Image (tube, rainbow, N blue to C red):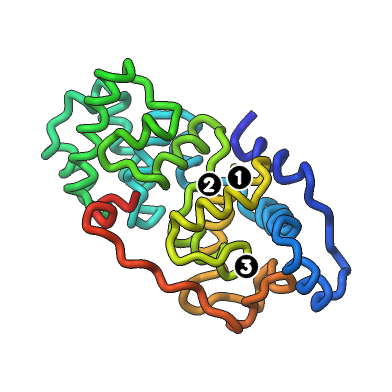
Amino acid sequence: MTLSSLCALNAAEKPRSYAGTNSTLLRRTLRMDRVRLAEEVVRRLSERYKQSLVERVGKGVPYRVFVATILSQRTRDEVTERVAERFLRRWGDVKALAAADVSEVQNAIKEVGLAPAKARYLVSAARIILQRFNSQIPKTEEELLSLPGVGQKTAGCVLVYAYGQAAIPVDTHVHRIANLLGLVKTKTPEQTRRQLQALLPRHLWLPVNRIFVLFGREICRQRKPACQSCPLADICPSAGGKETAPKQPERSAKKASTGG
């Protein structure tokens, strides 16, 4: 079963339909019950967003997912996909990447953001994976976080998209939208991750990253959100620009170099 199918199954486990409900009453009711609000959000957005870039490029293969996740940070999807496919044809597994020259890798990925740092991290991580993990991409958050250039978001993406493990990778889109929807009230992505995982039933964790990221890029944009065409307008407390997203926290030099 594919991750998209698994997410759809999980998202469909609990949510009920609110079609035809008075929108003012609906918004008031869901504000009082954030879990029910989250279930409805996941149900609606899962119908719209079926596959992320990392799923498309990664194809459920842990090494491909790891590479695609690293390359995608601070890079447009179309650029990431083109560079990742070229990269994976040249360095198709951990052993090949571990033997690569960092300067060659940097030249191969020069179109993506933060290419020098990503090249160093990819090669260094591959060498550690080869030596410590028998060429297998780690399957636990703790082991993934031990790799250079891997933060909570990258570790979470590998767990979700490579192994189908319940996690909530939080980037700026997930952080911003979760706050706009009133699911959390936080100042940093890490606070958002912790609060979402405490709030949401585990069967809702898998699709959160995919649907919030794609929704944030297409409709709930930070600048000029398309509230009039938003599928969540009737249940979103921020619809119409009544509320604003939290300011993005300043990032440390280390985290800014990887996107985490």
Q: Please report the residue visible at 64 percent of the width from the left and 52 percent of the height from the top.
A: 199
Q: Are marks 1 and 2 in contact (CB under 8 Å)?
A: yes
> 175 or 90, which lies in front?
175
Residue 42 lies, in percent from the top left, at: 68, 54
Say whether residue 170 is visible: yes
Residue 151 picture location, percent across and down: 35, 45
Residue 206, located in which quarter of the rendered image?
Answer: top right
User: Disc number at residue 205?
Assistant: 1
Q: Quadrant of residue 58?
A: top left
Q: Which mark is residue 168?
A: 2
In space, the residues marked 1 and 2 are separated at their CA atoms by: 6 Å
Amino acid type, callout 2: Ile
Q: Residue at x 17, y 43 (%)?
A: 106
Residue 187: where, in percent of width, then height? 45, 66
User: Quick one: label 3 or label 1, which is nearer the N terminus?
Assistant: 3
Label 1 Cα crowd, 10 Å radius (few <14 / some 14-19 / many 20+): many
Q: Which residue is mark 3?
A: 181
Residue depicted at x 28% and y 50%: 258
Residue 131 in the figure: left or right of residue 170: left
Residue lying at 69% horizontally and 73% vertically, measured from the top left: 233
- Residue 218 in sight here: no
Q: Indicate the amino acid at tag 3.
A: Leu
Determine the secondary structure under disc 3. loop
Q: Verify CB contact (< 8 Å) between mark 3 and mark 1.
A: no
Do the CB atoms of the residues marked 3 and 2 lie less than 8 Å apart?
no
Using the numbered discs, state the Cα–Cα distance from disc 3 to disc 1 in whole angstroms. Answer: 16 Å
**Quadrant, the N terminus:** top right
The mark that comes first in sequence, 1 or 2, is: 2
Numbered mark located on residue 39 in the image? none
Identify the secondary structure beneath mark 2: loop
Kindly report the distance in space between the C-alpha atoms of the residues bearing marks 3 and 2.
Answer: 16 Å
Vertical side of 227 occupied by 88: above or below: above
